[in-house]
Amino acid sequence: MKKFMLTTISILLLFTLIGCNNNKPEETEDNTIVNQPVEETEDNIIDNQPVEETSNTEADSKVDSAADSEAAPTDAPASITGIIQDATMNTITIKTAEDVELNFMTEDADKTKCNGLIIGSSVDIFYTGQIDGTDTSNVTVTAMEQPSEQ
């Protein structure tokens, strides 16, 4: 009985190791890579939820007109100030003075001048790129700073 259990466990372990092999991409004669596995990231996962049509709200219009009037190049550094509505490890949602909610990815941002991101407190976000209405997907946050309390 012990030999049977040992053999069964050995076979299962062997199948486990075979299933976890290292899939290296194959190169063809013209040096193109085939059979390359795709890593799932936040950027390449498609949401299977139906897309809802939204209308341009008054708040979106305010942000659009402000963005149009600036006419700054997309790589020019800019900043925006708002009240923190939500904050996670790599995102922050703020509400601006125009009552517009914006969500930013903060993964690579310098957060050294922030002493804890507390909901309801003010924050300055420094970024490059262009905010299009409430769409911040073309924005790269470079730094965040909490204004000093006076």
Image (cartoon, rainbow, N blue to C red):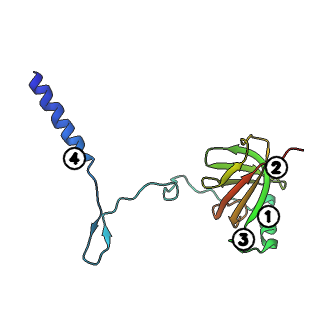
User: Label 2 is placed on what type of residue?
Assistant: Pro
Q: Percent x, y for residue 128?
A: 69, 65
Measure the alpha-carbon separation of dots 2 and 4. Answer: 56 Å
User: Label 3 is placed on what type of residue?
Assistant: Ala
- The image quarter containing residue 11 is top left
Measure the alpha-carbon separation of dots 3 and 2. Answer: 22 Å
Q: Is residue 89 left or right of residue 59?
A: left
The residue identified by callout 2 is 147
Earlier in the chain: of badge 4 and badge 1, it is: 4
The residue identified by callout 3 is 76
Determine contact: label 2, label 4, CB under 8 Å.
Answer: no
Measure the alpha-carbon separation of dots 1 and 3. Answer: 22 Å
Instruction: Give above or below for 39 relative to 31.
Output: above
Measure the alpha-carbon separation of dots 4 and 1. Answer: 57 Å
Determine contact: label 1, label 3, CB under 8 Å.
Answer: no
The residue identified by callout 1 is 61
